[in-house]
Image (spheres, rainbow, N blue to C red):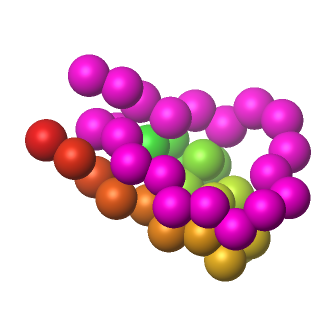
């Protein structure tokens, strides 16, 4: 089980795969043009 939390800066467009994302982490990734993928 991996949960992505928001800390630091993101300057690149990324696709991040994890089991869970904090709301802030999700928002930061998507604001930079990236995507999140929830894996089970």
Residue 14, visible in the rendered structure: yes
Q: Is residue 8 magenta?
A: yes
* Residue at image point 48% right, 52% down: 16
Q: Is residue 14 magenta?
A: yes
* Residue at image point 44% right, 61% down: 36
Q: Report the predominant secondary structure element of the magenta stretch.
A: loop
Q: Taking 10 as reference, is 4 above or below it?
A: above
Percent x, y for residue 39? Answer: 22, 47
Residue furthest bottom in the image: 33
Q: 27 left or right of 19?
A: right
* Residue at image point 60% right, 69% down: 34
Percent x, y for residue 27? Answer: 61, 61
Q: 17 left or right of 29?
A: left
Which picture quadrant has residue 20? top left
Residue 27, visible in the rendered structure: no
Q: Quadrant of the N terminus?
A: top left
Numbered label tally = 0
* Residue at image point 75% right, 32% down: 7
Percent x, y for residue 30? Answer: 61, 70
Q: Quadrant of the C terminus?
A: top left
Q: Taking 27 as reference, is 3 above or below it?
A: above
Q: Taking 3 as reference, is 22 above or below it?
A: below
**Between residues 23 and 3, which one lies in front from this camera angle?**
3
Q: 2 left or right of 25?
A: left
The part of the chain drawn in magenta is 1-20
Q: Taking 7 as reference, is 36 above or below it?
A: below
Residue furthest left in the image: 40
């Amino acid at each position: 089980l991996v949960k992505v939390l928001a800390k630091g800066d993101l300057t690149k467009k990324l696709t991040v795969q994890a089991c869970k994302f904090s709301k802030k982490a999700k928002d930061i990734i998507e604001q930079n043009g990236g995507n999140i993928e929830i894996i089970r």
